[in-house]
Image (cartoon, grey):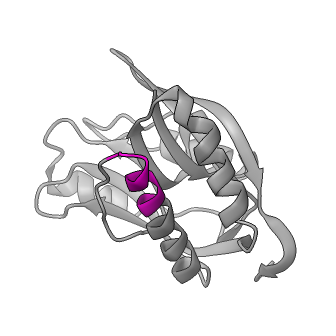
Amino acid sequence: MRIFFAFEIPDKIKSQISARLLSQKIKNIRFIDKDNFHLTFDFLGEIKKKDLPKIFNFVEENFQDVFQFVISNPKLEVVPINSPKIIWISFSSEAKQKIEIKKILMDKFLQSLGYKIKTRPYKFHLTLSRIKKEIGFENIEEIKRIKFDFDSLKIEKLTCFESILSAKGATYRSIKSFKLNKIGAING
């Protein structure tokens, strides 16, 4: 099973983002369906089904001190800038350091189960499109001008998803959600 953990985006914000993107007519860009919008926490890759209960127990034990938090300052980015492959919205948060530590702990736990993990710096981002064709400088500038009707959003849960690949792209199936604690919420 291809597994990843992600922080879910409120439906109202998903709809606002989708409506704004669909109102743009940009050549060679196909935006991801709003039902697949999320903030990736950790992409685990291929995981044996028998290991899921151990992973869920790890999350339940190690995320008790992660409180609901706010992400803010949405910024549309096309990355990498020299050869664009992804369009995403990046965010900042006071919770970033704690989330980075939890990702390191999760990766070490997965390694203890025998999985190979690619370590990368953590960045709060919501992927909007994976670019498959050359899009041109004019389109990049047009994309960067897109603005959204929110300054921040509250993150309330972490969800484990299965990524099911097909010729039409990936479909995500929610397997289990973990509510973040309200007590001690950051900016909440």
Q: Nearer the viewer, residue 51 or 93?
A: 51
- Indicate whether residue 114 is drawn in magenta: yes
Q: Quadrant of the C terminus?
A: bottom right
Q: Quadrant of residue 168?
A: top left
**Nearest the eye: 19 or 55:** 55
Image location of residue 100, percent across then percent down: 48, 74
Q: Residue reaching furthest top?
A: 167
Q: Position of residue 160 (x, y in %)?
A: 61, 42
Verify whether residue 52 appears in magenta: no
* Residue 130 place in picture, x, y as percent: 31, 41
- Asked if residue 130 is positioned above or below residue 143 in the image, the reply reads above
Q: Which one is nearer the viewer's eye here, 121 or 54?
A: 54
Q: Nearer the viewer, residue 151 or 7?
A: 7
Which SS does the magenta portion mostly show?
A: helix
Query: How far from the left and from the top, in percent, is residue 92?
Result: 53, 78
In the picture shown, does residue 123 fall above or below 138?
Answer: below
Q: Residue at x 50, y 53 (%)?
A: 40
User: In which quarter of the view is residue 28 placed?
Assistant: top left
Q: Is residue 166 left or right of residue 153?
A: left
Q: Residue at x 58, y 37 (%)?
A: 52
**Residue drawn at (53%, 27%) of the image:** 49
**Stretch of the chain drawn in magenta:** 107-115
- The residue located at (60%, 75%) in the rendering is 72
Question: How many tags in the picture?
Answer: 0
Q: Is residue 171 above or below residue 149?
A: above
Q: Is residue 67 left or right of residue 171?
A: right
